[in-house]
Image (cartoon, rainbow, N blue to C red):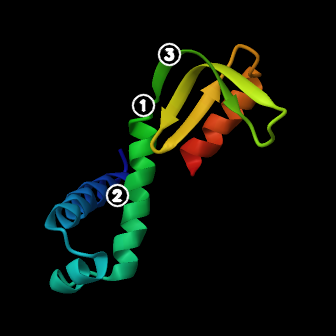
Amino acid sequence: MDTRLATNQIRLSEWTRIIKDRCQSGLKVDEYCEQHQLSRHAYYYWLRKVKEAALIHNSFIELTALPEKTVPATTSENHFTYQMTVTIGNTVLGVSESTPIELLSRVLKVVRNA
């Protein structure tokens, strides 16, 4: 492991602790940063880095099998029948046997990188 990678891992770990502490404190970001003499810019920069690392290392997707169900689409004439949902964070995708695997793969990549 080169020095830059090791340094980045240490900073990532430190900022993960800081971000968790801020969340547990109940303070707004600006208040927390002021109290701990942190720059708001640095906080949000590392928040993004921590989230990216979490997505890379913990790419857990919850799959829930459901009874077949029909859900209205954007118009009342179209309906989508799905057999399961894929939940990633607050995003829920309905998936059916007819969902093209290429489409599902692309959508999951977009959601993962969002």
**How far is the residue under mark 1 from the one under mark 3?**
16 Å
Q: Amino acid at mark 1?
A: Phe
**Is 34 positioned to the left or the right of 1 in the image?**
left
Q: In which quarter of the view is residue 68 placed?
A: top right
Residue 96 percent location from the top left of the image: 68, 18
Q: At 41% from the left edge and 48% from the top edge, which residue is drawn?
A: 53
Please name whichever residue, 51 or 93, is drawn nearer the observer in this view of the structure.
93
Amino acid carrying label 2: it is Asn
Disc 1 target residue: 60
Q: Amino acid at mark 3?
A: Ala
User: Count the marks: how many?
Assistant: 3
Pointer 2: what residue? 8
Disc number lying in front (2 or 1): 1
Q: Position of residue 5 (x, y in %)?
A: 37, 52
Residue 64 in percent (x, y) is at 47, 21
The residue that appears at 71% across and 13% down in the rendered structure is: 97
Residue tagged 3? 65
What residue sits 16% from the left and 61% below the top? 24
Looking at marks 2 and 1 on the same chain, the residue that comes earlier in the sequence is marked by 2
Q: Residues within 10 Å of mark 1 (few under 14, many from 20)?
A: few
Q: Indicate which disc, 2 or 3, sits on the residue closer to the N terminus.
A: 2
Q: Is residue 4 above or below residue 26?
A: above
The label shown at residue 16 is: none
Cα–Cα gap, marks 2 and 3: 39 Å
* On screen, residue 21 above or below 38: above
